[in-house]
Image: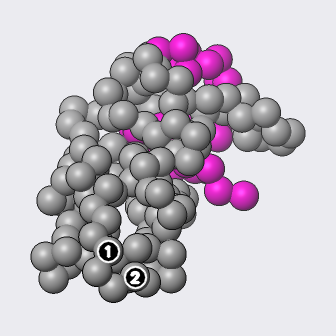
Amino acid sequence: MSFLRPPGALPESAFLKTCIHCGQCAAACPYGSVRMLETFGPERHTPEIRPSEIPCWLCMKCPPACPSGALRPVAAMKEANMGRAVIFKDRCLNWIESGTMCMTCYDRCPLRGEGMVLDMGYVPAVGESCVGCGMCEYVCPKNAVAVVPDVQKKRGKA
C-alpha cells in the first residue's frame, strides 16, 4: 500500500527505517493535515496525508519538528515533492460537459500556473511543478483529481 508522506520525506524504505513514530510532525501541523497511520506493520504510527480529507497547506512546519531526519527540511513549497496529482478526464467537468468551465483545482493550487496549469487556456492539467499537496483533490467538486505518492521517491531515487 502507498501512503502520501509529508513534505521532505525520505524515500519510503529509508523513511520507514528512520521514522521513530513519535508524532511530532503531526503535532506541529497547524491544519491537522498530518495524521499518524492506524495500521499494523512497519507503517504503524507513521505520518500520512489524506488529501480528500485535509490537504497539505505547504506550511513546512512538519519537517523541522522531525527529530529523526525522516522528514528533511524543505526551503520552499516547490521542493515538497510529496506526490503528483492525476486528473480523471472521465469525471472532470471541463472534459465531460461541453460549456462547463470549472477551474477550481487551478484556482486553489498553491503553485497555480506551475503545479496545476490550463491546457488550451481552459482545461486543467497537471504541471511539471506539482508537489502533491492534494489541494486540487480536496476542492474538486467531482472527485476528478487524486494525488499519488511520488513513484521515484518510493523507489529510493529522490
- The quadrant of the image that shows the N terminus is bottom right
The residue lying at 53 percent from left, 23 percent from top is 32
What amino acid does circle 2 point to? Glu
Residue 98 quadrant: bottom left
**Secondary structure under badge 2?**
loop
Foreground residue, 36 or 138? 138
x and y, in percent, of residue 28 in the image? 47, 15
Residue 151 seen from this side: no
x and y percentages locating residue 94 in the rendered image: 34, 76
Name the foreground residue: 26 vs 86: 86
Range of residues picked out in magenta? 1-28
Residue 57, image quadrant: top left
For residue 10: magenta? yes
Q: Are marks 1 and 2 in contact (CB under 8 Å)?
A: yes
Residue at left 65%, top 56%? Answer: 2
Number of disc labels:
2
Residue at mark 1: 100
Q: Residue 124 location in percent, x, y? A: 28, 70
Which quadrant does the C terminus fall into? Answer: bottom left
Which amino acid is tagged 1? Thr
Point 33% across, 28% down: residue: 60
Say which mark, if any, is on residue 147. none
Residue 23, x across and y down, in percent: 62, 19
Kindly state the secondary structure of the residue where label 1 is placed: loop
Q: CA distance from mark 1 to mark 2?
A: 6 Å
Identify the residue position indicated by label 2 in the image: 97
